[in-house]
Amino acid sequence: MPFLYRENLDPERDHWMFGHEQGRVARSIVLGQGFANPLFGETGPTAYPAPIYPYFMAGVFKLFGIYSEASAAVIIAVNCLFSALVTIPLYFYARRSFGERTALIAGWLWVIFPYSVYWTIMRIWDTWVTTLLIGILFLLTLKLADSDAISQWAGFGLLWGFTIVLNPVALAMLPGLALWMIYSLRRQGKRWLQPVAVAALCLVAGMVPWMVRNYIVFQKFIPVRDSLGLELYVGNDGNDSSLYDIDSGPWKNDAEWERFRHMGEIAYFDEKGRVAAGYIKAHPGAYALKSLRRLANVWTDFWSLNPKLLADDPYSPLVAALCTLLSILTIWGLWRAFRKDAFGAMPYLIVLLFYPLVYCFTHMADWYRRPIDPIFVVLAAYALDSMAGGKLPLPLRDRVSAACD
C-alpha cells in the first residue's frame, strides 16, 4: 500500500480516481448536499451508485478529510482487511464441501492470490466488502440448506437485502441458490415455505428504505441504481477495441458530461439506454458475439491483442495466461466435484454461471469478477489436491485446524 496508494490521489478531473462516482457522492454528503452530485458539478440527487459504500466513504471523509492522503490510507486499509477476512468463510465452505485439506490449500492460495492484494489497493470501490459478504452468504447457503430455523433464515434475508443495496449484481445468483436450498429442504422432509417466505420478507424490508427514498426523490420506481442505460451503452456502442468504451461516457467525454448536466440524470441514462437498445436491435449478431467475448473474458481476462491496449498494459498477456490457468483448474475442480457429489457441487456452478451474466450483457471490467474469485480459488485448490492424490504438504495444518475448530 505505501508504494501504490497514491495512484488514488491523482488530482486529474478533480480527484476522479478517488472513488469515482462513489467518492463524488461521499464528498457531497460531507458538504451537506445530500446523496447527490455523482460527477463534476452540482447536478442534484442521484441513484447512480448504490448507497452503502458512499456513506462509508463519507464517514471516513468526515473524520480524515475529503480526498486526503489519510482518507485514502484508511479506506484502502479497510479494503485490505475485508480481503483478508474473506479467508474465513472461504475456509469454512471449502471444508464443508471438500474437506479440510482443500480448505487449507484454498486459504493459503487466497493469501498469495495476486488479485486479493492488488485491486484492494489500486481501486477504491465496494468490491472487497461485496466479496466478503458473498462469501458469508455462500457459507450460509450451504448451512441453511439443512436447516429450517426461522430466525436463521430471517438473518439470511436481511444480509441478502444489505448486500443487494451494496451491489445489486449479487441478486443474479439468488434465484438459483434459493431453488437449490428449497430442493434440499424438501428432500430432507423439512419445511421450506415458511423459512423462504420470512427470508424474502426480510430481504425486501432491507431494501425498502432506499426504494422509498428513490421513489420520493425521482417519482419513479428505482430498486437500487438508475444507471443501467449508461452501463449498456458504454459496452455496446459499436466500439470493440476495449472491454468498454470509457471515452463515450460522461467521466472523460466533456460533451457527454455537458449532456448529463443539461438533461439531468434520469433523462440522460434513459437516452443512453435507448441508443444502446437501438444498436443491439440493428446489430444482433455483433451484440451476441461481443456478449460471448465478455463471457470468455470472465474466464481468461483476455480481450484482444490491440497494440494500444498492450501499450497501456504490457503485462496483460501474462495476466491472461495466469487467469486462464486458474480457470482451467477451476473447471477441473468443478468437474471432480460433480463426480463426487453433483448436488453438493451445484451452488458453485450457480455462482460461476449467474453472477457474471449482467456484465456479459452490458459491459465487463477487470475488477467485476473479483467478488467470485474465492469460488475459483476453492475449486482450483480442490483440483490441485485431487491431482496430488491428497498428498500436498500442509504446513501449520494442526495449529490452523485447531484454531478454526
Image (tube, rainbow, N blue to C red):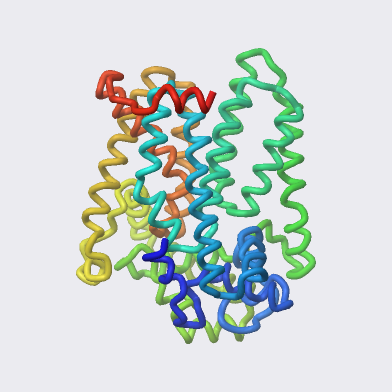
Front position in the image: 32 or 309? 32
State the residue at coordinates (55%, 42%): 134
Front position in the image: 58 or 43? 58
Front position in the image: 167 or 116? 116
State the residue at coordinates (21%, 62%): 305
State the residue at coordinates (59%, 46%): 171
Across and down, in percent, residue 15 comes to 50, 78
> Looking at the figure, which quarter contains the C terminus?
top right
Q: How many marks?
A: 0
Across and down, in percent, residue 88 comes to 51, 36
> Looking at the figure, which quarter contains the N terminus?
bottom left
Across and down, in percent, residue 297 comes to 33, 52
As drawn, 190 above or below 32: above
Residue 328 in view of the camera: yes
Image quadrant in which you'd find residue 364: bottom left
As drawn, 50 above or below 207: below
Q: Residue furthest top?
A: 189
Across and down, in percent, residue 261 comes to 60, 84
Q: Is residue 359 left or right of residue 261?
A: left
Residue 273 in view of the camera: no
Front position in the image: 170 or 127? 127
State the residue at coordinates (53%, 35%): 89
Q: Is residue 213 left or right of residue 275?
A: right
Q: Is residue 283 left or right of residue 48?
A: left
As drawn, 183 above or below 127: above
